[in-house]
Image (cartoon, rainbow, N blue to C red):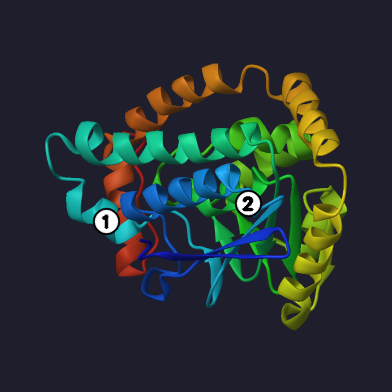
């Protein structure tokens, strides 16, 4: 059923493992479709009380598939037929995660960049390996943040810290992410999945109705306008995706050179 990820169930814990090593688990429309489908399957499953999402290989997720964007960006209907549907689908992923009844835990090793970082941020808990890096990489390719990042991050670390991460695009280490309050725990890479699963299995034995209602209350408290916000995000992401700077940014990324932005 799935070609870009694996889904397994054990001890009332569902484990979603992104696994497309050739692209560092990058998010194209196929990956996005499969993530959303797997989340829906776990939400509806009686075998899962808690959900873990992680990445196989060297990264949690490298973010958007830059080669996919480059291959299509010159098409006249690129935003409408390629970028727009992808941005809409990743927005559906993070909104669904926030509205799920079940607790979602992200286990992050290596890079969580761009949309990959923001999918991790949409989880209810984040465990990170010592080698984890959270990168709001959008600015480097001439794109404003998507996947709900500008909604989540200021609420998690404050407006100034969030602005710094978005505008500089600098990597944030696991240790710094812990200090900022972004993640629950930093562990050795080899211990990441075992410790995350142990935590999940402990939660799975707990009062799931309490978890469900607590999650609903936090959503109402912090994310009540999230659905409305995501339509605004799509508008501005589409505007940036039509720009010369975006085309230059993804070209420079693939050519491994600094981009020459013009502000157009």
Instruction: Tell me residue 7's x, y (percent).
Output: 52, 63
Relative depth, front residue between 225 and 219: 219
Q: Is residue 130 visible?
A: no
Q: Which residue is mark 2?
A: 120
Relative depth, front residue between 127 and 250: 127
Residue at image point 22% right, 31% down: 80
N-terminal of the pair, mark 1 or mark 2, is: 1
Relative depth, front residue between 200 and 173: 200
Residue at image point 60% right, 40% down: 97
Q: Which mark is residue 80?
A: none
Instruction: Tell me residue 167's x, y (percent).
Output: 58, 42
198 left or right, relative to 219: right
207 left or right, relative to 260: right
Q: Secondary structure at mark 2?
A: helix
- Asked if residue 56 is positioned above or below residue 25 in the image, the reply reads below
Q: Kindly give the residue lying farthest to the bottom in the view shown.
A: 190
- Asked if residue 4 is positioned above or below residue 262 in the image, the reply reads below
Q: Is residue 131 visible?
A: yes
Q: Residues within 10 Å of mark 2 (few under 14, many from 20)?
A: many
Give the quarter of the figure containing the N terminus: bottom left
**Residues under numbered marks 1 and 2 in contact, where contact means CB atoms less than 8 Å apart:** no
Q: Which residue is mark 1?
A: 68
Give the number of the mark in front: 1 or 2: 2
Instruction: Tell me residue 158's x, y (percent).
Output: 78, 34
Residue 152 in which image quadrant? top right
Instruction: Tell me residue 95's x, y (percent).
Output: 56, 33
Residue at image point 87% right, 42% down: 207
């Amino acid at each position: 059923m799935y070609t870009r990820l694996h889904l397994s169930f054990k001890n009332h814990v569902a484990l979603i493992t992104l696994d497309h090593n050739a692209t560092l688990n990058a998010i194209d429309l196929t990956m996005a479709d499969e993530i959303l489908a797997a989340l829906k399957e776990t939400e509806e499953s009686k075998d899962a009380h808690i959900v873990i999402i992680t990445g196989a290989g060297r990264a949690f997720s490298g973010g958007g598939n830059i080669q996919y964007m480059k291959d299509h960006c010159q098409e006249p209907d690129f935003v409408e037929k390629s970028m727009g549907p992808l941005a809409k689908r990743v927005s559906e992923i993070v909104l669904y995660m926030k509205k799920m009844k079940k607790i979602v835990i992200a286990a992050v090793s290596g890079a969580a960049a761009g949309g990959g970082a923001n999918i991790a941020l949409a989880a209810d808990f984040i465990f990170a390996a010592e080698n984890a890096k959270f990168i709001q990489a959008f600015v480097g390719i001439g794109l404003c943040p998507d996947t709900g990042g500008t909604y989540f991050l200021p609420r998690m670390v404050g407006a100034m810290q969030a602005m710094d991460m978005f505008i500089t695009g600098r990597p944030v280490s696991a240790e710094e992410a812990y200090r900022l309050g972004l993640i629950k725990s930093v562990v050795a890479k080899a211990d990441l999945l075992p410790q995350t699963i142990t935590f999940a299995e402990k939660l799975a034995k707990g009062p799931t109705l309490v978890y469900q209602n607590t999650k609903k209350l936090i959503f109402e408290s912090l994310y009540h306008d999230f659905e409305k916000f995501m339509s605004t995000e799509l508008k501005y992401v589409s505007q940036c995706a039509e720009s010369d700077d975006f085309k230059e940014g993804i070209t420079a990324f693939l050519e491994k050179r600094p981009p020459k932005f013009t502000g157009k």
